[in-house]
Amino acid sequence: MDKKKPELLVPASSLEVLKTAVIFGADAVYIGGEAYGLRAKAKNFSMEEMAEGIAYAHEKKVRVYVTANILAHNGDLEGAKTYFGELKRLKPDALIISDPGMFTLAREICPEIDIHISTQANNTNYMTYRFWHEQGAKRVVSARELSLKEIKEIRDNIPEEMEIESFVHGAMCISYSGRCLLSSFLTGRSANRGACTHPCRWKYALMEETRPGEYMPVFENDRGTYIFNSKDLNMIEYIPELVEAGIDSFKIEGRMKTALYAATVARTYRRAIDDYFVSEEQYRANMDWYRAEIAKCTYRKFTTGFYFGKADETTQIYDESTYVSEYTYLGIVGEVTEEGCARIEQRNKFSVGDEIEIMKPNGENIPVQVLAMYDEEGNSMESCPHPKQTVDVRLSETPEAGDILRVEKE
């Protein structure tokens, strides 16, 4: 196959998630610092954590991109200069930027770091791509509103060395390229400055001007009232079409998500991409596995978004706003003790006797039984009810460091 193999780009909300994404197959991860990225409520990275994460990823030959994609106000610029100076020392592989002012500062302060233009910059045509290429950007993230046909047209009309990054999985946004005013208007917290409260997921009613206090539910064809609530993007069944369009980087959305989410999505897309580049027959033969695995992470039903044309009423969810969640995340195996126990930082309660699953980076899911459990002092326990407690767990099969423990919900 003479097509270029795309990069798999996975989000990381914390150092733990970054390491998990690397172990489970990411070619690159994108992270945010404690300021200037569009996920203020994510845990985000301190400079020390960022340094450790970049060093860890680079040791594994994985790239790290740092978001600085707020739409900056005057008061942000002095702090941004300091921030870019600190990033210069840490040497991430690229900065993700949307604001021309922030772009200019980054070019001045750390010109040796590549710049990727965020989807927030409304990148919908090849002239926009050419503009950013002339300014010195290496990559542009396509607007989610583009079809595969439009992305192919962009590929055919931009320099060969310029890269296209496109979202292939995760939450969609009701607003054009994610530029939303609802959150700022309703709560005073601006989505464009990293503090989105996700009002598109709320339930709405209608009030008529001359009848104050009378709330009428918003119905659309009797399906309910969640008129803004988009399904989640899922392109696992369309890897050939994404490659054919000339996309260089397959981007996963979810910088607020858990290590289990990052591992599940990274592992599934890693295998799908690798299978396709062995042969399309191998990719098609494993489709049921991809579908089954991708459905094990948290999601809001699935859609192909705008890739095959304009979105319609089937792209929205009208009757509910809850996630589908089939598995509970128990923890990551930090190490295996001399006694053969898995040492984890527990994330959800489980008990001795439970049937759980070891999720391995190579695609295996191994059902095991919890045989015993010990606290940090070595005392035997029947269950671990306290989140983030360090626990040694003896299982019916011994896992490896980096494996994830999860349990299917009843």
Image (cartoon, grey):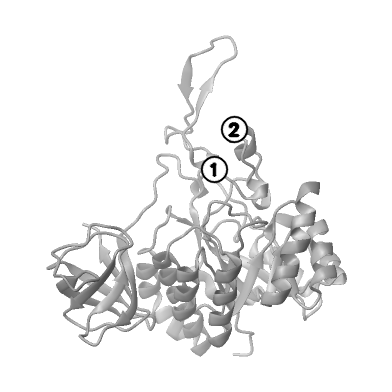
List the residue tagged with mark 2. Answer: 186
Rendering coords of residue 43 (x, y %): 51, 58
Mark 1, residues whose alpha carbon is within 10 Å: few (<14), some, or many (≥20)? some
Mark 2, residues whose alpha carbon is within 10 Å: few (<14), some, or many (≥20)? few
Rendering coords of residue 206 (x, y %): 52, 23
Place residue 319 in its image quadrant.
top left
**Circle nearer the N terminus (1, 2):** 2
Please state, as top left, top right, bottom left or bottom right, where the N terminus lies in the image.
Answer: bottom right
3 relative to 235, above or below: below
Q: Nearer the viewer, residue 86 or 175?
A: 86
Left or right of residue 100, residue 347 in this image: left
Q: Can residue 208 be seen in this view?
A: yes
At numbered mark 1, what does the secondary structure look like: helix, strand or loop? loop
**Label 1–label 2 contact, CB within 8 A:** yes
- What amino acid is labelled 1 in the image? Thr
- What amino acid is labelled 2 in the image? Leu
89 relative to 195, above or below: below
Place residue 135 in its image quadrant.
bottom right
Rendering coords of residue 190 (x, y %): 64, 43
List the residue tagged with mark 1. Answer: 197
Alpha carbons under labels 1 and 2: distance apart: 9 Å
